[in-house]
Amino acid sequence: ALAVAAAAAALGPAACTGQIGTIALDVVTAPGDDVLDRVDHVRLILSNPYTVVEAERGADGHFDLELDVIADGPSGSILLLGYDADDAIVAYGRTPPLPIAAIDADLRVYVAAPDTLAEAPVALDAAVSEVGAGLLDYGVLLAGGRDATGAPVADVVIYNAYGHELQRGEDLPAPRAGVAVGTSTSGYAYVFGGTDADGDPRGTFWRFDTTIAPAGLWDEAADMPDLARAGAAMAPLGGDAFLMTGAPPVLLEGLQLRATGFDDPTSLGGLPASVQRTQDPGAPIYTLIVGDGAGPEGVMRLADGALEAQSAPADALRSHHALVTTADDRMIAIAGAGADAVPLRSAIVCDPAQRSYTSQADVLTTGRLDAAVAATATYILVAGGRDADGNVLGDAELLDPDTLAHLGTIPMVVPRTGAVARPLPNQQVLIAGGLDADGQPVDLLELYTPPPPDLP
């Protein structure tokens, strides 16, 4: 067992009252995981202000650590590292950024062997495929999906990375599978389309206010049957506006709950993503759409209101792929297949600001369709999917986001295809949904825990 308390002693106006905040950390692992049994020594690190406390396992078998810091308001993460008798790191976890202030909070940190995929401490109530997913500041929103009977569901849950728990949201206004989901810093999430209980694609546009207790609140626009679609994707344009793929492509204005179809082009395939150059605050938001159906060569670029086809490598014309953004404002299109349906091992490296699109060969060890892909500042995870023979894959490949060098291949807990992967604010990745090797939807959630950063 491991008991951790991070106490923040307040300075400034709060100091005269002697206020102290305590952040209590409950350490959790995958169900049945014995990773903590292998730990003899624990190091607890606060990233800002940099503070380290250590403890050996006590005679009662427990570790007790307390971290005291000045409550001057900076944000920092708490890292927990467990060492075995040979001083090797065998367990690692970290929190998302925390306010180091005179506040009280009860949090949970998920600990696992570094560089592994393991079961999350919670699972979905119902196994689903075709689930929609959107990023929030504190976790991942999962909406709708298709259950084991093939029926769409209305479930909404948020995986909260601060508590490693599922927070139940108010159900979708109607069951849907294959919805498009967009989120913003406003606290709103937007859900469009999907397949209804009769198997028909719909043109419904819903806004979910995640800030309203206890389970959020939905607002609905009038149904738009001329914009009906399922399996579409959307990318942010700023100001709670989004570009959505399909026929026709659609401009979504979330705050107004307004959807407007494009006259030209009449159809837009592929996957969209957006970046804004952090080193150039005056630059526009760049949105790329990459894949088969995105112009004649597989890349379309939207910037300053102009949507233009781009010159791109032949293997940009792919489907069943993923498109992720990197910390240096590039985009990587990876996995999927070309017109011959053969899984691709290459990746398309896109720099929308420079209008640069290059193909990098042999990035993946195994070409795969419908993989779950997520990117963080230090790695890209490409998990599961289907190989050239249609087999559901049970491994994940790790790539360097700067060079796309292969970092390794690790086993998944459950082989799956068509799942979603999203980065969490604690630098882990959540994998949810999809179909297993028997074609059944999956309720088990997986977490990838990366190696810890280099430490002083």
Image (cartoon, rainbow, N blue to C red):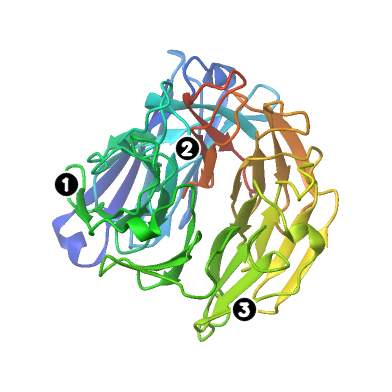
Q: Which mark is residue 213?
A: 1
- Provide residue 29's location: percent of width, then percent of height: 47, 25
Circle number at residue 308: 3
| Residue that sits furthest to the bottom in the current view | 282
Q: Secondary structure at mark 1?
A: loop
The residue that appears at 21% across and 51% down in the rendered structure is: 218
How many angstroms separate mark 2 from mark 3 (CA)? 30 Å
In the rendered structure, which disc, 1 or 3, sits on the residue that comes first in sequence?
1
Task: Name the amino acid type tagged 2.
Answer: Glu
Nearest to the observer: residue 110 or residue 78: 110
Asked whether residue 96 is in view, the answer is no
Classify the position of the N terminus by image quarter.
top left
Asked if the residues shown at circle 2 and circle 1 are in contact, with their CB atoms under 8 angstroms apart, the answer is: no
Marker disc for residue 224: none
Question: Alpha-carbon neighbours of circle 1 within 10 Å: few (<14), some, or many (≥20)?
Answer: few
Indicate the position of residue 164 as horizontal and vertical percent values: 39, 35
Image x and y of residue 397, in percent:
72, 39
Q: Residues within 10 Å of mark 2 (few under 14, many from 20)?
A: many
* Foreground of the two, 44 or 152: 152
Residue closest to the eye, 397 or 196: 196
Q: Quadrant of residue 250?
A: bottom left
The x, y position of residue 125, in whole percent, is 35, 24
Residue 130: mark: 2
Cα distance in 3D space between marks 1 and 3: 42 Å
